[in-house]
Amino acid sequence: MDVIYAIDIAGTFAFAISGALVAIRKKFDVFGVIIIAFVTAVGGGMTRDVLINAHPINWIGDINYIWTILIAVVITFFFRSKIAPLRRTMFLFDTIGISVFTLIGVQKGISFNLHPFVALVMGMSSAVMGGVIRDVLTNEIPLIFHKEIYASACLAGGVVYLLLYPLEMNEDLLFVISAGIIVIVRTIAVQYKLELPRIKKDIFGKQ
C-alpha cells in the first residue's frame, strides 16, 4: 500500500471519529451519526471533485473510504469513553489528515491543469470543507471561522508545495516537506493558542 494512501485512509478514519463524536454529543440517532461521520471524512474531497468535475468522486471510486468510515463509527459507539480522552492522539491524526488532504487536493488540481491559485483553493477545500459541512449540519459555527489557525496552515503548506513544484524535486520529498509545514504551523498555533486577528473596529474606530 502506498504510504500517502495509507495516511489518507488514517486521516479519513480520524475525521470520521471526530464527526461521530460530535453527532453523539448532539444526541443524533445511529443514522445521523453515520451521516455526520461520512460528511466529515469525505465531504472535502467530494466538494473538490464536484467543483472540478472529477469522476469518479473520491469515495465512489474507492470503497475503502466507506469501510473506513463505518469501522470508525462502530469503534466510536463501543469505545467512546476511551476515545474521548485521546485528544492529543486524535489531534495528531487530524493534523496529518488535513496535511495529506490539502496536498492531494493541490495535486489533483494541478493534474486537471487548473491555475495554481485554483489548485490551492481545491487543496484547502479538500482539507476543511468536511468540517464545515459537519458544523453546519450540527448547527455550529464552523471551526475554521472562529478558532485555531486551521485553514491558514493548509494554505501555508499548499503555497510551499506550489513554490517547490517547478523545481522538479522528488515527489515524495516535496510532499513530506509541504505536509511538514502544515503540521508545524498548526501544532505551534494550537500550542501557543494563536489565532488570526478579528475585525472589531473600522478605521474610524466604530464597531
Image (cartoon, rainbow, N blue to C red):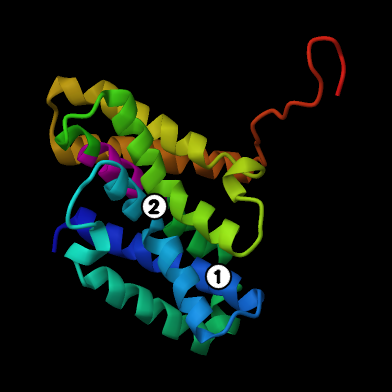
Q: Nearer the viewer, mark 1 or mark 2?
A: 2
Numbered disc 1: secondary structure: loop
Question: Residue 103 placed where, x, y %?
Answer: 29, 41
Task: Name the mark on residue 122.
Answer: none
Question: Residue 6 placed where, x, y %?
Answer: 24, 62
**Which residue has dot 2 on it?**
44
Residue 87 belongs to magenta span: no
Label the magenta part by its dominant secondary structure. Answer: helix
Q: Is residue 17 visible?
A: no
Q: Would you place residue 6 above or below residue 189 in this image? A: below
**Residue at 23% of width from left, 57% of height from top?**
57
Q: Earlier in the sequence, mark 1 or mark 2?
A: 2
Closer to us: 69 or 35: 35
Q: Is residue 200 visible?
A: yes
Q: Would you place residue 163 above or below residue 180 in this image? A: above
Query: Could you tell whether 202 is left or right of 127 in the image?
Result: right
**Which residue has dot 1 on it?**
86
Question: Residue 40 placed where, x, y %?
Answer: 45, 62
Q: Quadrant of residue 97?
A: bottom left
Are discs 1 and 2 less than 8 Å apart at CB? Answer: no
**Residue at 51% of width from left, 67% of height from top?**
19
Quick one: quadrant of the C terminus?
Answer: top right
Q: Would you place residue 193 above or below residue 44 in this image? A: above
Question: Residue 146 placed where, x, y %?
Answer: 67, 43
Closer to us: 21 or 62: 62
Range of the magenta residues?
Answer: 98-108
Circle 1 residues within 10 Å: few <14, some 14–19, many ≥20: few
Quick one: quadrant of the N terminus?
Answer: bottom left
